[in-house]
Amino acid sequence: MNQIILLIFVIGYGAIAFESKHKINKSAIALVTGVLCWMVFILFAENKEIVSEELAVHLSDVSGILFFLMGAMTIVELIDRHEGFDIITTRIRQRDKRLLLWMIAFITFFLSAVLDNLTTTIVIVSLLRKLINNEKERVFFAGIVVIAANAGGAWTPIGDVTTTMLWMGGQITSANIMMKLLLPSLICLLVPLIYLSFVLKGEIGTPPKLSTANPDITERNKLVIFTTGILSLVMVPIFKTITHLPPYMGILFGLGLLWILTELMHRKKESRTRSVYSVSQALQRIDLPSILFFLGILICIAALQSTGLLQMTANWMDKTIKSQQVIVILIGLLSSVVDNVPLVAAAQGMYKLSVFPTDHYFWEFLAYAAGTGGSILIIGSAAGVAAMGMEKIDFFWYMKKISLFALLGYLAGCATYMVQAWIMG
């Protein structure tokens, strides 16, 4: 059974990678692959009820991520529809490629630490659409945004889901992880940026088009919607900390408040005008195929987790490799192929706090590796999947143009962490 499921996963993964060749939408392939994995699992299982229960448990977690993604995308779309991003884009007049890349990368890095890498990617890619008209240039910038978002999310307990898992599980503490991973995460981003500073030349081809005056949207409307929308995103980690409810509840709460605000703002306008700025219209404009792609990938990974394939891989590495550093580095590399969440969950199950206590070297290094390793391939992280869907980034294009930078940054960050740990004892 495990061999069949693994074969289905490999074939599906390959089909997604070759989307540009066979012209079949990757979302359809991901859905078919995910369902086939579970079909094989339940057909070979003796107790089919247990398999159904496991699927329901995984679907609960997956749906939370999907609702979060839908909510964040809708909020960003509402801000964009109300021209809220003009508040930022009209102030960014830098056209030099290198300087603009550094500016965007650092904004992404620190915003990701405050929000999370997924939400930040959605916001920044939306900004890039306003700043860069040339599609090839914009896609390249989006690839670097993925690296910056994952690097920025790795060093805070709320910036990446795996770091949050370790924080909630008691393996790390917030102040310590921020102190220990800030430098490695920064190096992970700086290495690609420094290299690109010697490669990139010239200016962004076409300057962004300034919005013409819109009688339906005043400057006050723009500011109110932009501020409310960004606060709705920023407050999600605080909402989670205070209420202990999952992040998608916070994003849905923020979306609901923004929905009420837009209804009040346009209530006196004609119905046709109101519909243009409504949440219903925004929901029609978000990229639902990308959300379905995310669903397919997540249920596929869930099947690998439920069948024990990921746990078996983790156990094999533990028995064969021995070295903690090498194991963690390999987990980071593996997270570029499969989701980092079940890999970290497997590591949490393998190594107890009695073996590696809170803030141990292993947990800190794991938080960095799992958070940044996914940047090496476009489908290795939630940020990558979001960017892939929003900008239609080709798997092999990313591998050719971005993966090497991501790998160099990842390895440089690993080396930085190990040297830092050696110096600090």
Image: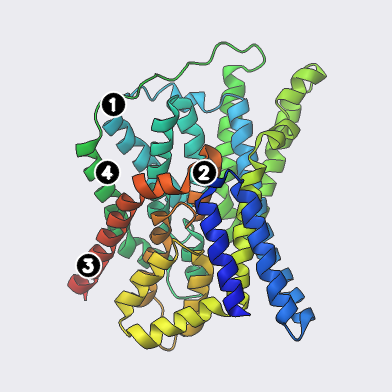
Q: Amino acid at mark 2?
A: Ser
Q: Amino acid at mark 4?
A: Leu
Mark closer to the chain start, 1 or 3: 1
Q: Residues within 10 Å of mark 1 (few under 14, many from 20)?
A: some
For the residues labelled 1 and 3, the Cα–Cα distance comes to: 34 Å
Q: Amino acid at mark 3?
A: Gln
Q: Amino acid at mark 1?
A: Asp
Q: If the image is split into quadrants, where does the N terminus sit?
A: bottom right
Mark closer to the chain start, 2 or 1: 2
Outermost residue, right side:
271
Residue 326: x percent and y percent?
A: 31, 75
Residue 177: x percent and y percent?
A: 37, 65
Front residue of this view, candidates 275 and 37? 37
Image vertical order of residue 357 relative to residue 31, above or below: below
The nearer-to-camera label among 4 and 2 is 2
For the residues labelled 4 and 2, the Cα–Cα distance comes to: 28 Å
Tell me which residue sits at (48%, 16%) in the image. Answer: 210
For the residues labelled 4 and 1, the Cα–Cα distance comes to: 14 Å
Tell me which residue sits at (56%, 70%) in the image. Answer: 7
Identify the disc placed on residue 96: 1
Q: Which residue position is annotated with label 2?
A: 20
SS state under label 4 = helix
Q: If the image is split into quadrants, where does the C terminus sit?
A: bottom left
Q: Which residue position is annotated with label 3?
A: 420
